[in-house]
Amino acid sequence: MKIIECVPNFSEGKNEKTFQLIKDSISETKGVKLLSLEPDADYNRMVVTLAGNEEGILNGAVNVCTAAAEAIDMREHKGEHPRLGAIDVVPFIPVKNSTTEECVAISKKFGEIIAKKLNVPVYLYEDAASMPKRRLLSNIRQGEYEGLEEKLKNPDWYPDFGEAKFNPKLGAIVTGSRFFLVAFNVNIDSNEVKYAKEIGEIVRESGYPKRDESGKIVKENGETVRIPGKLKSVQGMGVSLEKFAMTQVSMNLKNYYVTPIHVAFEEVKKEASRLGVNVKGSEIVGLVPLDAILEAGRFYTKNKTNNEKELLDSAIENLGLSFLNKFVPEEKIIEYMI
């Protein structure tokens, strides 16, 4: 059996009626299963995880996005997380007996269908990108929803599907295929977001702009000079977590083999210590592959055990994965849920 994962991110993290609409939209769809729905009120964002076969995952993605489009209005949206629209990003990920090429084809079918169905511009990214500058989600998101109307007037940013017309209610959608991304946030014990923002800039692969002695950004040939970050295949930023009176270094680990979870965690701890603030655990948003957690367990046990439960327990304890919300392996590890 082929298993393909789809992880739609929606710009809504507070409305219970919307959450229920999403759940109902998938309950009658054959060949797909809703694995998790994780809202975050501070980010005002919801991460939904689906898994199924080729036909099921396509139909499931269309159904959940159609339901979300009915309930979300970007003209009223405010939140910490960058976003381009109500249905911000819809990636398809090969999990078992499936390939990137198959997921790219599914993402293109999805893009064509949803653009017509919702009258919304759709962009392709990562492995499905139609041109190099659209490969990175951050490039497509630049300017966010607020700058989208102007962006759509630029021929360089005409969508891959749909018309180059601004949809004020829904914004735009990004879809494509990628490697299994781990959404990993490290908690900083300070309500001053400047520390988390600085750490995010230092650890993310894209780094941060170079500045001269007066603090002015350095440019060469009109281009900003950037100082590379410490961690490869990592996106990062600092955000406030108001309900806990804390902040977070919010990271996307785009390839957990290149930068494992424990490496990202330890690097953030090191930078936090340099700035005089403490790390108070971490969290994984959405699901995570078993091997990614076991690798952290091997690191913290110094490879002294091969027992799966001991490795899991060590990773959960040392990463502080239950600090904000209890980490339940049966509800967070994808292999345990399929």
Image: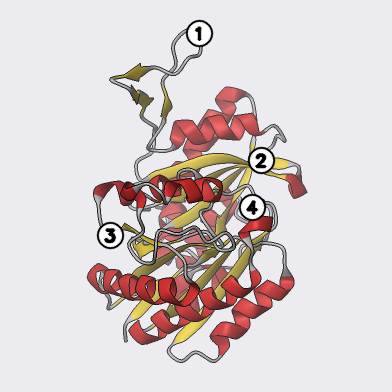
Q: How far apart are marks 3 and 1 (CA)?
A: 41 Å
**What residue is drawn where x is 37% and y is 46%?**
154
**What kind of residue is marked 3?**
Asp
Relative vertical location of residue 31 with respect to residue 290 in this rendering, above or below: below
CA–CA distance in space, label 1 to label 2:
28 Å
Question: Which badge, 4 or 3, is on the more N-terminal residue?
Answer: 4
- Residue 297 percent coordinates (x, y): 46, 55
| Secondary structure under the numbered disc 1 in the rendered image | loop
Q: In this view, does 26 lie above or below 259?
A: below
- Reading the image, the residue beneath label 3 is 127
For disc 2, the marked residue is 247
* Viewer-nearest of discs 1 and 2: 1
**Image point (58%, 49%), residue name:** 81
User: Tag count in the figure?
Assistant: 4
Sequence-wise, the earlier of marks 1 and 2 is 1
Earlier along the polypeptide chain: callout 2 or callout 3?
Answer: 3
Please tell me the numbered disc located at residue 214.
Answer: 1
Looking at the image, tell me whether mark 3 or mark 1 is earlier in sequence order. 3
Q: Quadrant of the N terminus?
A: bottom left
Quadrant in the rendering for residue 247: top right
Q: In x, y percent, where is residue 72?
A: 63, 67
What residue does disc 4 label?
Answer: 43
Work out whether residue 251 can be spotted. Answer: no
Q: Which residue is drawn at 56% across and 47% down?
A: 146
Taking the image as shown, residue 177 lies to the left or right of residue 85, namely: left
Task: Name the element at disc 3.
Answer: loop
Identify which residue, 261 or 178, lies in the foreground.
Answer: 178
Amino acid marked by disc 2: Thr
Residue 168 in view (yes/no): yes
